[in-house]
Amino acid sequence: MPKYIIERNIPEAGNLSPDQLHGISLKSCNVLRNLGPEIQWIESYVTDDKVYCVYRAPSEDLIREHAAQGGFPVNSIRAVRSIIDPTTAE
């Protein structure tokens, strides 16, 4: 299944409290549950003003549907073409 990186512009994201992050996560999981097993949230990285999410999904359309149902911004969706890490150099 394709893997995607989703960029979400969220001003002051780095200042979200643990309770706020919990609420966002809970909302996302509820929407994912309703959409079915084809879309999977792997993890997200919270920076000062953005959140970068890693998802598996059959299409960008399903990712956009998740965002629409959850009220989450989607500023860009990029398909992951390759993954490299230090072992790639070996």
Image (cartoon, helix red, strand yellow):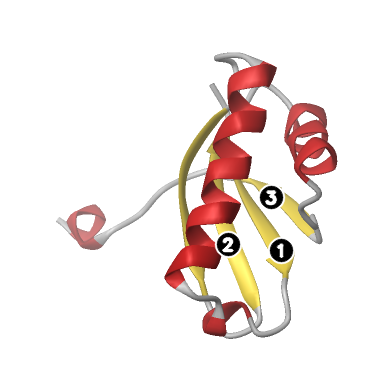
Q: Position of residue 13 (x, y in %)?
A: 61, 77
Q: Is residue 12 above or below residue 58?
A: below
Report the residue at 18% width, 55% height from top: 87
Disc 1, SS: strand
Q: CA distance from mark 3 to mark 1?
A: 12 Å
Quadrant showing the C terminus:
bottom left
Q: Earlier in the sequence, mark 3 or mark 1?
A: 1
Q: Mark 2–mark 1 contact, CB under 8 Å?
A: yes
> How far from the left and from the top, in percent, is residue 62?
76, 27
Q: Is there a contact, CB below 8 Å, between mark 3 and mark 1?
A: no
Q: Amino acid at mark 2?
A: Tyr
Left or right: residue 33 compared with residue 45: right
Q: What's the mark number on residue 52? A: 2
Q: Nearer the viewer, residue 17 or 2?
A: 17
Q: Residue 78 — which label?
A: 3
Q: Are marks 2 and 3 in contact (CB under 8 Å)?
A: no
Report the Cα–Cα distance between label 2 and label 1. Answer: 6 Å
Number of numbered discs on residues: 3
Q: Residue at point 73% right, 26% down?
A: 59
Left or right? Give the position of 12 relative to 37: right
